[in-house]
Image (cartoon, rainbow, N blue to C red):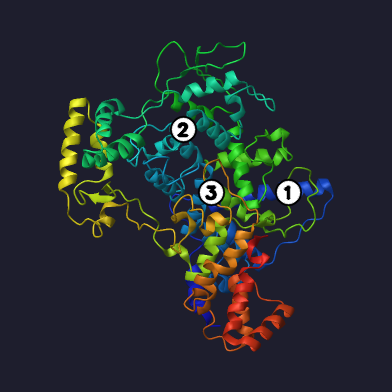
């Protein structure tokens, strides 16, 4: 078969997959851990006297592996080649291929963006683009989870500096430190403490006093050099109508430099609120930092300290016994298998109290053994026979737990649907460059000092100033330089030089969801299909609505795929001599399986009756089918 350059592309796709890149975990170690998991599952079936599930067929495994590992369906070339080759080790080779694909970090970025609520712009005029870029790069570099967590929780410094851009985790919630702390506990330790901000938790063990003791670790957040610039800022703001150029320049320094920095490492003490209502403390009383569980870490309320966030990070990662490892292991199990060993994944249950104590303990030990390498951990799960099991058509026999019967049937996420449509429309989207970070200085929406200075250098210079006099002199020079700057107002030639080395994609670009604006605009396909607005942790939805149906029938699916003769999908029809062959290729490209006998009969009738329009009708019907929109 020559369609889609099948054999040539296939040989390129799977060539050299058995090699081991520098820094990667030993494949033998991953297989050993996968076997340990499968043995636990086998013991579960023996103890329950249940029949072991059948292994899913190649087509089901192919689609499942692609969507789980890299968040999109295979391209026509990838699907055709995998289904055609006869190789006993091709599933293992496919998993290896997927984990080495740039699509893995793209899919992981979507997960991380939702989890830590990454947005392009904060409330007001400041934005979070350096932080977004930092998270994206952390996923691309496969930063270990314990390091990722430490960077976020212990962050301090300049938001534009690549070494400290993780401060965006806190500045994203400027003015809301207690909410940020609640989110941190939920994200990293699976502990819900938000109720304890106002009262003792009636559904848990957390008291309000406990919460404020924990909040003391992160108390005392501020902005670097804020005191030096504030008097001048107020002066310029009060006269902004008479001094518009100065006001525009001040917005850059105040919002994009000062407002994106984080000062104070965490004082370790905090005053109880004025409405505090319990006997263990008085309103306004200063209390010291103290951790509520795990190995106790405390700070004195009687002396000023500046390393509270670092102590908090160390406690979360190293001093909460197995909780930190178990929470992220359960999150990754759900990501791969479709359901956590306990649910919800952010309501922690110790291994002994989970539906599968031995499995939970095993997964946590594997996570630790792999040094919190999330890619290696997911690789292990993808290598298991458990991942290959056919989906259970019956209701789970395990109350509130996983029955280990294959990947759970689930509608694709908004990002998975979008990335799959992009794959059909333009081909493999993972070859496109990642979105870069525009570091140019913009004054009044106009790039200035292009080729001379960027936001990284500007922020370092401003935050290094020591006196108000130095700040005023710097500001005056900045106003003069940006007012005189007229070279290349659009900045077209310098953009690549002044950015991190990648393009900027608008909302209409046919690229992976991870490269589009975050969060998606409210009228975008992603938002209509439930993408998170990033206001709360993991706020994405997979619930159906009428808008989704209308979008499939009249929106991007029709414009960029069904009615576009240049869509990549149609290239696979080249060289197909019969209606049956064209239908087979469409099915493999869209649903990643060949059609059955009845489907072939229906679709050939459609092509015989309507010709080219029939082809488009078949594409529309398959893309809007439940089979395309669901993962099993």
Which residue is located at x 67 percent, y 48 percent? Answer: 339
Question: Local crowd at mark 1 within 10 Å, few (<14), some, or many (≥20)?
Answer: many
Circle number at residue 159 = none
Residue 607 position, x and y percent, is 63, 85
1 vs 3, front mark: 3
**Distance (Cα) linking label 1 and label 3:** 27 Å
The C terminus, quarter of image: bottom right
Left or right relative to 236: residue 293: right
Which residue is located at x 56 percent, y 17 percent? Answer: 275
Is 576 rendered above or below residue 568? Answer: below
- As helix, strand or loop, the secondary structure at mark 1 comes to helix
Question: Local crowd at mark 2 within 10 Å, few (<14), some, or many (≥20)?
Answer: many
- As helix, strand or loop, the secondary structure at mark 2 comes to helix
- The residue under label 1 is 41
Left or right relative to 417: residue 109: left
- Does label 1 or label 3 sit earlier along the sequence? 1
> Which residue is outermost to the right?
49
Circle number at residue 153 = 2
- The image quarter containing residue 340 is top right
**Distance (Cα) linking label 2 and label 1:** 36 Å
Is 194 rendered above or below residue 23? Answer: above
Does the CB distance between marks 2 and 1 fall below 8 Å? no
- As helix, strand or loop, the secondary structure at mark 3 comes to helix
- The image quarter containing residue 582 is bottom right
- The residue under label 3 is 111
- The image quarter containing residue 291 is top right
- Residue 85 shows in this picture: no
Residue 363 position, x and y percent, is 63, 42
Does the CB distance between marks 3 and 2 fall below 8 Å? no
Residue 536 position, x and y percent, is 55, 40
């Amino acid at each position: 078969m020559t369609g889609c350059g099948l054999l040539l592309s296939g040989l390129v796709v799977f060539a050299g997959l058995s090699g081991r890149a520098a820094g990667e975990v030993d494949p033998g170690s991953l297989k050993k851990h996968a076997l340990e998991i499968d043995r636990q599952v086998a013991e579960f079936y023996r103890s329950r006297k249940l029949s072991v599930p059948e292994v899913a067929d190649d087509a089901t495994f192919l689609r499942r592996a692609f969507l789980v590992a890299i968040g999109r369906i295979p391209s026509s070339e990838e699907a055709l080649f995998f289904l055609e080759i006869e190789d006993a080790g091709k599933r293992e080779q496919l998993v290896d291929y997927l984990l080495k694909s740039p699509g893995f970090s793209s899919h992981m970025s979507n997960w991380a963006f939702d989890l830590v609520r990454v947005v392009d712009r904060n409330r007001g005029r400041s934005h979070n683009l350096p932080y977004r870029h930092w998270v994206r790069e952390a996923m691309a570099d496969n930063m270990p989870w314990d390091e990722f967590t430490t960077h976020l929780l212990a962050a301090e410094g300049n938001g534009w500096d690549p070494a400290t851009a993780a401060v965006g985790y806190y500045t994203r919630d400027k003015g809301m430190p207690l909410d940020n702390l609640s989110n941190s506990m939920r994200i990293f330790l699976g502990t819900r403490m938000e109720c304890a901000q106002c009262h003792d938790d009636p559904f848990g063990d957390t008291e309000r006093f406990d919460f404020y003791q924990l909040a003391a670790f992160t108390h005392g957040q501020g902005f670097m050099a804020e005191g030096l610039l504030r008097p001048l800022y107020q002066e310029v703001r009060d006269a902004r109508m008479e001094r518009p150029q100065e006001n525009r320049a001040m917005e850059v320094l105040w919002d994009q430099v000062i407002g994106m920095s984080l000062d104070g490492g965490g004082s370790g003490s905090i005053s109880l609120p004025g409405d505090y209502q319990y006997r263990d403390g008085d309103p306004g009383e200063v209390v010291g930092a103290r951790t509520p569980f795990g190995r106790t870490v405390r700070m004195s309320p009687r002396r000023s300290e500046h390393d509270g966030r670092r102590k908090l990070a160390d406690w979360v990662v190293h001093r909460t016994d197995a909780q930190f490892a178990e929470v992220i292991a359960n999150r990754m199990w759900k990501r791969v298998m479709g359901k956590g060993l306990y649910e919800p994944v952010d309501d922690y249950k110790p291994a002994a109290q989970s539906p599968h104590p031995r499995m939970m303990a095993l997964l946590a030990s594997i996570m630790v053994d792999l040094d919190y390498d999330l890619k290696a951990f997911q690789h292990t799960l993808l290598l298991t026979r458990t991942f290959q099991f056919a989906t259970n058509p019956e209701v789970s026999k395990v109350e509130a737990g996983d029955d280990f019967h294959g990947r759970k049937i689930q509608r694709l996420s908004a990002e998975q649907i979008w990335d799959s449509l992009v794959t059909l429309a333009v081909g493999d989207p993972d070859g496109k460059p990642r979105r870069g970070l525009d570091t140019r200085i913009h004054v009044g929406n106009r790039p200035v000092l292009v080729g001379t200075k960027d936001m990284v250098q500007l922020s370092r210079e401003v935050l290094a100033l020591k006196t108000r006099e130095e700040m005023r002199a710097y500001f005056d020079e900045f106003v003069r330089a940006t007012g005189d700057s007229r070279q290349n107002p659009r900045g077209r030639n310098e953009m690549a030089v002044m950015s991190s080395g990648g393009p900027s994609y608008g909302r209409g670009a046919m690229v992976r969801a991870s490269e589009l604006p975050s969060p998606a605009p409210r009228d975008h396909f992603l938002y209509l299909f439930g993408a998170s607005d990033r206001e709360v942790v993991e706020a994405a939805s997979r619930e159906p609505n009428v808008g989704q149906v209308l979008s499939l029938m009249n929106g991007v699916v029709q414009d960029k795929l069904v009615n576009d003769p240049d869509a990549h999908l149609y290239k696979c029809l080249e060289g197909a001599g019969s209606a049956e062959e064209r239908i087979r290729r469409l099915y493999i490209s869209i649903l990643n399986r060949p059609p059955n006998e009845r489907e072939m009969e229906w679709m050939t009738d459609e092509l015989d009756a309507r010709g080219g329009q029939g082809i488009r009708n078949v594409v529309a019907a398959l893309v809007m089918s439940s089979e395309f929109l669901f993962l099993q």
